């Protein structure tokens, strides 16, 4: 799988492939060269998932109703911990 193929994946597909790679690496049955290659793919998949999540957060708006009954939208913000 090359970078172009990774970039075309949906979030769900990328996450599933990432989980599969992690399981395979954790099993310890992977040869060193294959493990390095899998790790590189996993890194790219992780970055893709993070980017897609960030983009989704930026698109989300909080919908509210003002005291006068008017519908408003505010930028999405994460609650501070």
Image (tube, rainbow, N blue to C red):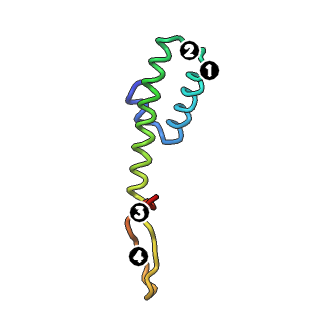
- Where residue 11 appears, as percent x and y from the top left, is 49, 42
Q: Secondary structure at mark 2?
A: loop
Q: Could you say which quadrant of the image residue 48 lies in?
A: top left
Q: Secondary structure at mark 1?
A: helix
Number of residues whose C-alpha sits closer than 10 Å to that of mark 1, classed few (under 14), some (14–19) or many (20 or more)? few
Above or below, 17 against 64 in this view is: above
Residue holding disc 4 = 72
Q: Nearer the viewer, mark 4 or mark 2?
A: 2
- Which mark identifies residue 76? 3
- Where residue 70 appears, as percent x and y from the top left, is 42, 83
The span from disc 3 to disc 1 (Cα, nearest Å) is 40 Å
- Where residue 20 appears, as percent x and y from the top left, is 58, 28
Q: Residue at x 43, y 88 (%)?
A: 68
Mark 1 or mark 4: whose residue is earlier in sequence: 1
- Which mark identifies residue 27? 1
Residue holding disc 2 = 30
Q: Nearer the viewer, residue 73 or 25?
A: 25
Q: Could you say which quadrant of the image residue 7 lies in?
A: top left
- Where residue 34 appears, as percent x and y from the top left, is 49, 14
The span from disc 4 to disc 2 (Cα, nearest Å) is 54 Å
Q: Secondary structure at mark 4?
A: strand
Contact, mark 3 vs mark 1 (Cβ under 8 Å): no
Contact, mark 4 vs mark 2 (Cβ under 8 Å): no
Q: Secondary structure at mark 3?
A: loop
Contact, mark 1 vs mark 2 (Cβ under 8 Å): yes
């Amino acid at each position: 799988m090359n970078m172009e193929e990774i970039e075309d994946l949906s979030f769900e597909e990328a996450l599933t492939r990432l989980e599969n790679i992690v399981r395979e690496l954790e099993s310890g049955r992977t040869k060193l060269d294959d493990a390095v290659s899998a790790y590189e793919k996993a890194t790219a998949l992780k970055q893709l998932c993070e980017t897609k999540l960030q983009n989704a957060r930026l698109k989300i708006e909080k919908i509210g109703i003002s005291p006068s009954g008017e519908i408003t939208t505010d930028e999405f913000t994460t609650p501070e911990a």
